[in-house]
Image (cartoon, helix red, strand yellow):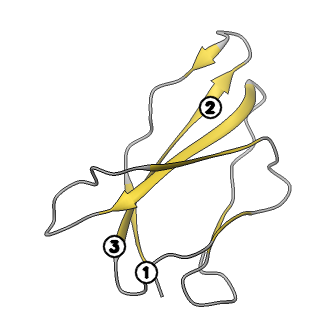
Amino acid sequence: MAGKNSGELLIYFKADDDAALYKIQYGVTEGGQPATDWTQRVSSNVKSALVLQGLTIGKTYEFQARILSKSLNQYTDWSDSVTFIAT
């Protein structure tokens, strides 16, 4: 969800009872090619948004998420990618 300011994105995580942490990675896609340079952020909070700032307006970003599983004591695989055009 776009934030209040240009280049800002609010990320909300769906609560998962098995999640100790939530991790996202995101990067700019160029010419329809997948992102190659990823930025990672970690959150333990699902009650408020994780705010990403400094996104370049008009650029398309690719996002993936995963959790640190309490039961497995390791990270799950990355989710399928979703894209967002920064405004």
The vertical placement of 27 against 86, above or below, is above
**Image marks 1 and 2: residues in contact by CB distance under 8 Å:** no
x and y, in percent, of residue 1 in the image: 60, 74
- Name the residue located 13 percent from the left edge and 69 percent from the top edge: 31
> Residue placed at 80% from the left, 50% from the top?
46
> Which residue type does callout 3 highlight?
Thr
Q: Is residue 10 above or below residue 74?
A: below
Q: Residues within 10 Å of mark 1 (few under 14, many from 20)?
A: some
Residue 52 vs 15, above or below: the answer is below
Which element carries disc 1, helix, strand or loop? loop
Do labels 1 and 3 touch, CB within 8 Å? no
The CA span between labels 1 and 3 is 9 Å
Residue at x 60%, y 79% (from the top left corner): 8
Q: Nearer the viewer, mark 1 or mark 2?
A: 1
Q: Pick whichever of labels 3 and 2 is earlier in the sequence.
A: 3
Q: Residues within 10 Å of mark 3 (few under 14, many from 20)?
A: many
Q: Position of residue 4 (x, y in %)?
A: 70, 88
| Pointer 1 residue | 56
Q: Amino acid at mark 1?
A: Thr
- Helix, strand or loop for disc 3: strand
Q: Is residue 31 left or right of residue 74?
A: left
Give SS at disc 2.
strand
Residue labelled with disc 3: 60
Most foreground residue, 8 or 79? 8
Q: Which residue is mark 2?
A: 67
| Kind of residue sitting beneath label 2 | Ile
Determine the residue located farthest toward the right in the rendered image. Answer: 47
